[in-house]
Image: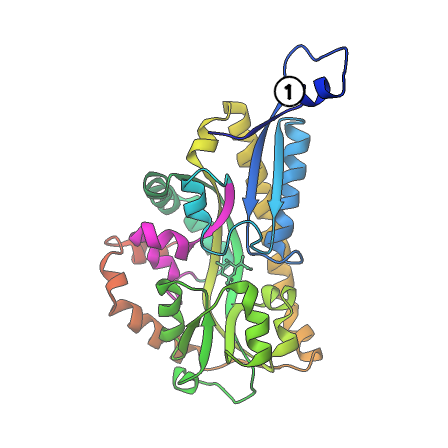
């Protein structure tokens, strides 16, 4: 059941004499994300909101909740299923819990770059998999957001060349088994922690490091409490702007089109800015005093790919999907 706000009651309460002929209702779209305000996938929601205000004036009440203040990280899909949340960005890891086929996108060194990522999800592979997502999660993905390429970020400056060098390193990962598997596959000891607790964990030393794309390392200020960036480039990460089917189906055809267009504009804004910033940040981190190194990426790739291929995850990847992804150019 959609939350709606009426101005009719307010007008009556004010003792207004001329009431509008019809109650003006706004469709409430609640958004929840762990993103920090200064990150591109937080700012993109303002683009979403402003575009809807232009294309559908007075029709939507877009409520943006950052820093996981409304729902904790990873709890968004369940909140949507219960009808407590209309919109969010879901990760491949969130999806893989309910759509195991999707775990191929949680595996390191599968997607090559942001351009290929857009082609994968805007083409037939995306159409097929998003159909499963809609059926099994009751949400509709509206656009694909490049979260960035994940890099290892450590408290100490001990050189890291191969996965063996991460042995025993307590590498924070978000708290689900799919994420922890990735951290372990890198050679580290994966340790679960919510995004909002990572800064403190690094500062106090309850964790030895974390992995995130460079723009998020900048926006969440992890560089203040770490000494080293190891450019493993282990995951070209994506999140998907998704709306609950119940909310989407309650919209008119014109509104569906406008909400979709706004989600695509938000993703485009994020992707453009994030890609640009990602290319410039190494210099920034060096100026901040961090050691930035490129390890033996081939060694990481081989080891991580072999770990996934030997795992139960690979058993449920649709036949031929990896080849189709690799052939997407
Ligand atoms: C993180 O917790 O490391 C992560 O990068 C995981 C993503 O799926 C996403 O939840 C992101 O955090 C948040 O949006 C914060 O940037």
102 vs 289, left or right, is left
**Residue 252 image point, x, y percent:** 51, 23
Q: In which quarter of the image is residue 216?
A: bottom right
User: Eyeballing the image, is 56 above or below 20?
Assistant: below
Q: What residue does disc 1 label? A: 24
Residue 20: percent from left, percent from top: 70, 13
* Left or right: where 300 falls relative to 149: left
Q: Is mark 1 within 8 Å of ligand 1?
A: no
The x and y percentages for residue 189 are 39, 78
Left or right of 36 in this view: 208: left
Question: How many neighbours does mark 1 have within 10 angstroms: few (below 14), some (14-19), or many (20 or more)?
Answer: few
Residue at the spot 37% in from the left edge and 75% down from the top edge: 184
Please tell me whether residue 193 belongs to the stretch shown in magenta: no
Q: Where is residue 152 in the image (x, y as percent from the top left)?
A: 51, 75
Residue at left offset 53%, top offset 67%: 212
Q: Quadrant of residue 128?
A: top left
Q: Which SS class for mark 1?
A: loop
Identified at 65% across, 69% down, the residue is 221
Figure quadrant of residue 222: bottom right
Q: Is residue 100 magenta?
A: yes
Q: Quadrant of the C terminus?
A: bottom left
- In the figure, 83 relative to 199: above or below? above
Could you say which is closer to the camera, residue 293 or residue 256? 256
Question: Which residues fall within the magenta stretch?
Answer: 87-111
* Residue sitting at x 44%, y 62%: 112
Furthest-bottom residue in view? 158
């Amino acid at each position: 059941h959609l939350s709606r706000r009426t101005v009719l009651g307010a007008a009556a309460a004010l003792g207004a004499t001329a009431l509008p002929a019809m109650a003006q209702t706004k469709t409430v779209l609640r958004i929840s994300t762990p993103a920090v305000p200064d990150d591109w996938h937080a700012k993109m929601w303002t683009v979403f909101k402003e575009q809807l205000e232009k294309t559908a004036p007075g029709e939507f009440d877009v409520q943006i909740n950052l820093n996981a203040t409304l729902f904790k990280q990873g709890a968004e899909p369940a909140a949507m299923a219960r009808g407590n949340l209309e919109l969010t960005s879901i990760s491949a890891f969130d999806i893989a819990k309910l759509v195991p086929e999707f775990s191929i996108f949680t595996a390191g060194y599968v997607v090559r770059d942001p351009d290929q990522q857009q082609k994968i999800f805007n083409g037939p592979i995306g159409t097929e998999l998003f159909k499963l997502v809609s059926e099994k999660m009751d949400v509709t993905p509206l656009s694909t957001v490049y979260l960035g390429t994940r890099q290892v970020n450590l408290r100490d400056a001990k050189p890291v060349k191969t996965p063996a060098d991460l042995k025993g390193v307590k590498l924070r990962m978000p708290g689900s088994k799919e994420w922890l598997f990735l951290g372990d596959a890198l050679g580290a000891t994966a340790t679960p922690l919510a995004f909002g607790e990572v800064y403190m964990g690094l500062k106090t030393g309850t964790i030895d490091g974390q992995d995130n794309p460079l723009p998020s390392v900048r926006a969440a200020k992890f560089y203040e409490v770490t000494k080293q960036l190891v450019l493993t480039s282990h995951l070209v990460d994506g999140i998907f702007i998704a709306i609950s089917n119940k909310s989407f189906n309650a919209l008119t055809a014109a509104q569906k089109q406008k909400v979709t267009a706004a989600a695509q504009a938000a993703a485009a804004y994020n992707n453009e800015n994030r890609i640009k910033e990602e290319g410039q940040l190494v210099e920034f981190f060096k100026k901040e005093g961090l050691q930035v190194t490129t390890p033996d990426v081939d060694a990481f790739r081989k080891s991580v790919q072999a770990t996934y291929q030997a795992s139960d995850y690979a058993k449920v990847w649709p036949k031929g999907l990896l080849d189709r992804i690799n052939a997407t150019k």
